[in-house]
Structures are given as C-alpha cells and as structure tokens.
Image (spheres, rainbow, N blue to C red):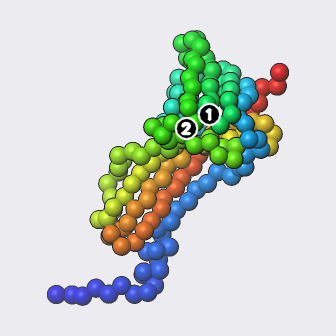
Amino acid sequence: MRLVFITPGILAALLAGCITNVHVTGKPGSTNLSGVYRFAGTGRVRPDQLANPLINWSDIAESSKLELDQRGNEEIYARYTNKSGNLVERNVTLRDASDEAIFRRGELSFKKRIPILDAQIFPGYARQSVGTRFFKDQDGNLRVIGFFTETGLMLFLFPFVDHHEDGVMLEADDP
C-alpha cells in the first residue's frame, strides 16, 4: 500500500484553481432602465446565455426596437417585435421571488438555479445557476450581461466558484 502525501505546493495549486471569474466590465449610469433601444442581434452570445423572464432573445426580430418602461422599483414592462412580426408585451414584478428578480442601484438582475449540466471531475457538492443583468451605461445604452455560476465543495473540503459572463449592448434609440 502506498501513501500519497499532498505537499503544500500541490495544495496551493489546487486552491488557486478553485476560483475562476470572467466578468464583463461596466457600471450603471442611471437608476432607471426606461428607454427605447435598437436590437441588432446577440452576436457571438447564444440567446440561452441571456436567460430571463422578461425578453425571449431567441424570438426577438433583428433590427427590432425594444422598449422598456420601468415603474419605480415595483414593475418593468418590455415591448418588442418577435420574428413573426407580432408585438410582444411582457412585464415582471420586481418583488416577485419566483422570478428571483432584484433591482438595486440601477441594475435589474434575474437568477435561477439549474440542474447540474456536466459531470463532476471530483467528488463533492456543486450548485449551478444562470441569470441576466440589465443596466443602462453612461451613454444611455442598455447592457445585457448573461452569467453562469457554479459553486460548491471539491472533495467536500475545498470551496470553489466558477463564474462566467458574456453580454450584448443595445444602443439607445434617440427620438
């Protein structure tokens, strides 16, 4: 029988690899998301990476205008044209815990837990969640950031966080 010892160097390398963060930079430039924005596609971002109950990114028509109407910190309405040419209207109550919608300091965020999508490398415990953040930048454009987060305990001992973000920008439509 062989005994395996974990040296401090191996332990440090293991712990250093336990936190992965890829963030999209940007800060809210307004405390209200109301406005009309031009949608020009999601580019390299897949629509499923922007999961939220307000806008179906896979169904919004190219070159459509997205209108957001925020009513205080209570409700937000979205209007846009879908790929079939129909007007879509949706609203989200910002205090509704089922959507996990949070509006704070000019940023609207949705987050929900999802089932584990892939096989774990090590035994342990993991949780995965996806979501989307909306905010108006300093130039009045709407920034939409989709994120994926996995947290847990590797080998039931070492905490880890894996967080990735990707986003799109919708230009403000000047009246």
Q: Residue furthest left?
A: 1
Looking at the rendering, in which quadrant would you find the C terminus? top right
For image coordinates 44% across by 55% down, the residue present is: 150
Q: Looking at the picture, how far across and down is residue 101, in whole percent?
A: 54, 40
Looking at the rendering, in which quadrant would you find the N terminus? bottom left
Q: Check the image and report above or below for 164 versus 112.
A: below
Q: Looking at the picture, how far across and down is residue 19, in whole percent?
A: 50, 66
Within the image, what quadrant is residue 85 found in?
Answer: top right
For image coordinates 59% across by 14% down, the residue present is: 87
Q: Looking at the picture, how far across and down is residue 160, in whole percent?
A: 45, 65
- Locate residue 169 relative to residue 120 in the image: left or right: right
Q: CA distance from mark 1 to mark 2?
A: 7 Å
Name the amino acid, label 1. Answer: Glu
For mark 1, does the 10 Å Cα neighbourhood hold few (<14), some (14 to 19), or many (20 or more) residues?
few
Q: Earlier in the sequence, mark 1 or mark 2?
A: 1
For image coordinates 65% across by 46% down, the residue present is: 104
Q: Residue furthest right?
A: 175
Marking on residue 74: 1
Q: Secondary structure under badge 2?
A: loop
Within the image, what quadrant is residue 119 found in?
Answer: bottom left
Q: Check the image and report above or below for 77 versus 83.
A: below
Within the image, what quadrant is residue 66 found in?
Answer: top right
Residue topped by disc 2: 95
Q: Secondary structure under badge 1?
A: loop
Q: Is residue 167 visible?
A: no
> Are circles 1 and 2 on residues that touch, CB within 8 Å?
yes
